Image: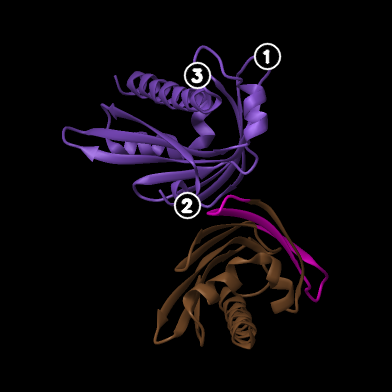
Amino acid sequence: MDAAKVMTFQCHETSIFDVPKETIYGALHDMRRWPDHLPHVLKIEVLYDDGQYQEFHMTVASEPDTIRVRSIRNCSADAIDFFQPEPPVFLRHHAGRWEFTELPGGRCQVVVTHAWNLEPERAAAVFPPKDGLTTDQQVENMLAGHSRQTLDAWRSALTAVTT
Amino acid sequence: MNIIQTVTVKAPAAEVYAAFADLSRWNEILPDVLDVKVLYFDGYHQEFTMTVERPDGPETIRGVRYCRPHRELELVQTTPPPGFARMRGTWTFREADGATEVTATRDFRLADGHPLPEQEVGDRLTLILKDNLNLFRTAVERG
């Protein structure tokens, strides 16, 4: 991932889907339908979409209030790269990638990568060292957790559709 | 519709790439650029707005570039100019014998109801692209 070269931190989560590559890729590509698939995605507002490049606002359920993020994506045949031009206050930069590899038997491997640079002072204020974990580790745990939750949510959604 | 133009600049690729990548230099190099604001840049992704002078008044586009030193800049205008539904492209840089060949491509689609035929717009854009490449060549070679 080109963006990883300019980011200090990154994490990867991998999952195998029992659906063909085009099914999971198509679901990830068509952000307009995410609220139909993913309960935590409340709203998608598409700002630009030419099939390859996409820009949208996504509103997701969270506590104590909903979160609205802007994402810009570059979609190729085997991967969807994204970045957040207005990342959360504790991140200076935030980008990532969904990578899709077709497997035998109509399955697909999906690797989610997050890459980021911290906004150190704000990150330390939001995630002060706790339970033996540094600020860096807590941010990594949070983003890796998001990746796992999203992969699990997609697996549930696509299994429900295909069975 | 796709258009393409090439220019050879007598300078190393790093130097030529730097001129195209550094948006703060654009209003010195291109006379129709009135203002450029970089909204986000992490070293790879770059979001910006650019205001240019046009016969009907200033036009502001918003764009995203993917910066791959010193070989390629990939562009999409998420807010394209008036009359365009899509504007995207690349600049690629290939160094040989102390000079750099810059190839600029544009892939555009007119908005519905555009008054001019696509070919005519393409011809005009080709000339603008050629002029701009030559302005960059002059700026880089002047140093």
Q: How crowded is the residue under tag 1: few (<14 C-alpha within 10 Å), some, or many (20+)?
A: few
Amino acid marked by disc 3: Leu
Same chain, marks 3 and 1?
A: yes
Residue where numbered disc 2 is placed? A52
The foreground one among A41 and A2 is: A2
- Residue drawn at x 67%, y 24% is A125
Coordinates of residue B135 in the picture (x, y in percent): 64, 84
Disc 2 is attached to a residue of which chain?
A: A
Instruction: Report the side of A56 relative to A140 (left or right).
Output: right
Determine the CA span between mark 3 and mark 1.
Answer: 24 Å
Q: Colour of chain A?
A: purple
- Residue drawn at x 47%, y 66% is B72
Coordinates of residue A46 in the picture (x, y in percent): 61, 41
Q: How crowded is the residue under tag 3: few (<14 C-alpha within 10 Å), some, or many (20+)?
A: few
Amino acid marked by disc 2: Gln
Q: Which residues are magenta?
A: B41-62
Task: Let me know if residue A89 appears in the view.
Answer: no
Residue where numbered disc 3 is placed? A133
Disc 1 is attached to a residue of which chain?
A: A
Coordinates of residue B65 in the picture (x, y in percent): 56, 58
Q: Nearer the viewer, mark 3 or mark 1?
A: 3
Coordinates of residue A101 in the picture (x, y in percent): 27, 40
Residue where numbered disc 1 is placed? A64
Q: Sequence order check: which comes first, mark 2 or mark 1?
A: 2
